[in-house]
Image (tube, rainbow, N blue to C red):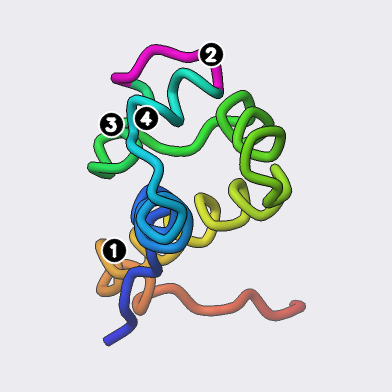
Amino acid sequence: MARITTHPGAMLQHEFLVPMGISARALARAMKVPPTRVTKLLRAETGMTADTAIRLERVLGASAGFWLNLQNSYDLTREQVAKAEAYAELAPLVAA
């Protein structure tokens, strides 16, 4: 069975905030967004938006594309796992 890839909020927490010693509140201040936007992302209660990705690029240096690719990969694998049986029933079309 396939596994769901890492949510961008988990990546943000474990690869950026913890090693840098930055709190969610401090990150939100630097990004000029409400703290709830950051905390919901860290808890995987919401996904990465283009706006959040651009703001993270500005304050942390990792590209907006990096953040959006993480979200896309997470969404894709989550869907593949959730609907694996339904997708297994699909067959490629062949020319008549």
- The residue tagged 3 is 39
Q: Secondary structure at mark 4?
A: helix
State the separation of the CA atoms marked 2 and 1.
38 Å
- The residue tagged 1 is 83
**From this viewpoint, is residue 85 visible?**
yes
Q: Position of residue 2 (x, y in %)?
A: 33, 82
What residue span does the magenta drawing correspond to?
Answer: 31-36
Q: Amino acid at mark 4?
A: Val
Q: Amino acid at mark 1?
A: Lys
Task: Tell whether label 2 touches label 4 (CB within 8 Å).
Answer: no
- Tell me what residue is drawn at x 33 percent, y 19 percent: 35
Q: Nearer the viewer, residue 85 or 75?
A: 75
First in sequence, mark 3 or 2: give its number.
2
- The residue tagged 2 is 32
Q: Is residue 58 above or below residue 82?
A: above
Q: Nearer the viewer, residue 60 or 92?
A: 60
Q: Amino acid at mark 3?
A: Thr
- Tell me what residue is drawn at x 41 percent, y 37 percent: 47
State the separation of the CA atoms marked 4 and 1.
29 Å
Task: Tell whether label 3 touches label 4 (CB within 8 Å).
Answer: yes
Q: How crowded is the residue under tag 3: few (<14 C-alpha within 10 Å), some, or many (20+)?
A: some
First in sequence, mark 4 or 1: give its number.
4
Q: Is residue 72 above or below residue 59?
A: below
- The residue tagged 4 is 38
- Tell me what residue is drawn at x 38 percent, y 56 percent: 7
- Tell me what residue is drawn at x 73 percent, y 48 percent: 63
Mark 2 or 1: the one toward you: 2
Q: Nearer the viewer, residue 19 or 67?
A: 19
Please state, as top left, top right, bottom left or bottom right, where the C terminus lies in the image.
bottom right
First in sequence, mark 3 or 1: give its number.
3
